[in-house]
């Protein structure tokens, strides 16, 4: 079964494999993230001060909040391969935060398959370039090389 999945994935290398819907990053989401991560830095949590003291016109999302949305974008766009029993987040090779996400911005994830490697008789490791785009802006919020392990029946 894994051989068929490897062949299928190999044929998609270099192509876009997913594009999520837009998600609004509002101040409530930013404040909740700040609370959960214990990162209340004013640039994120004080919209009035951020409007006065930064060039962004208001508060901005934490970079890690933007990155954390990758899981939702993957769930929204990723289909299991034939025989796959689970997917595992294997990590990131590279992440670059290129543009802040302002409170109220909409973002989405775009996935391009970069590589796929069979790691064991039941595991395929895929690397995707993930671009998190900001609606109406030319420069994305971030670009990351994201690794995912697909696990198959033995």
Image (cartoon, helix red, strand yellow):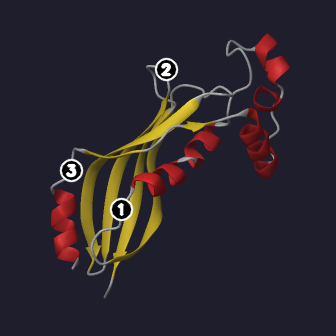
Q: Earlier in the sequence, mark 1 or mark 2?
A: 1
Residue 118: percent from left, percent from top: 25, 70
Q: CA distance from mark 1 to mark 2?
A: 28 Å
Is label 3 in a helix, a strand or a loop?
A: loop
Residue labelled with disc 3: 13
Vertical order, 139 against 83 (above or below): above
Which residue is at the far bottom? 154
Q: In the rendered view, does 84 fall on the left or right side of 49?
A: left
Q: Secondary structure at mark 1?
A: loop
Q: Residues within 10 Å of mark 2 (few under 14, many from 20)?
A: few
Closer to the camera in the image, 26 or 3:
26
Residue 60 horizontal/vertical position (percent):
69, 28
The residue pinned by badge 2 equals: 136
Measure the alpha-carbon separation of dots 3 and 1: 16 Å
The quadrant of the picture occupied by the C terminus is: bottom left
Residue 97 appears left or right of 53: left
Q: CA distance from mark 3 to mark 2?
A: 28 Å
**Residue 79 - label:** 1
Label 1: how many residues lie within 10 Å, few (<14), some (14-19) or many (20+)? Answer: few
- Identify which residue is drawn at 25% across, 54% down: 115
Picture coordinates of residue 150, whole percent (x, y): 36, 69
- Cβ–Cβ below 8 Å for labels 3 and 2? no
* 60 up-or-down from 79: above or below: above
Residue in view at x 30 percent, y 80 percent:
122
| Image quadrant occupied by the N terminus | bottom left
Q: Residue 113 location in percent, x, y?
A: 29, 49
Disc on the earlier residue, 3 or 1: 3
Q: Identify which residue is drawn at 81% across, 32% down.
A: 45
* Mark 3 or 1, closer to the camera: 1
Would you identify the image quadrant in which residue 112 lies? top left
> How many C-alpha atoms fall within 10 Å of the one at disc 3: few (<14), some, or many (≥20)?
some
């Amino acid at each position: 079964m894994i051989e068929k999945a490897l062949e299928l994935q190999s044929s998609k290398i270099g192509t876009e494999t997913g594009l999520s819907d837009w998600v609004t990053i509002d101040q409530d989401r930013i404040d909740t993230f700040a609370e959960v991560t214990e990162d209340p830095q004013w640039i994120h949590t004080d919209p009035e001060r951020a409007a006065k003291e930064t060039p962004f016109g208001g508060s901005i999302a934490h970079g890690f909040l933007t990155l954390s949305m990758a899981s939702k974008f993957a769930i929204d766009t990723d289909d299991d391969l034939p025989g796959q029993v689970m997917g595992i987040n294997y990590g990131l090779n590279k992440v670059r935060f290129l543009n802040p996400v302002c409170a109220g911005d909409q973002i989405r994830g775009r996935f391009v398959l970069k590589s796929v490697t069979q790691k064991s008789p039941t595991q395929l490791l895929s690397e995707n370039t993930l671009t998190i785009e900001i609606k109406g802006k030319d420069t994305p919020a971030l670009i990351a090389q994201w690794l995912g392990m697909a696990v198959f029946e033995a």
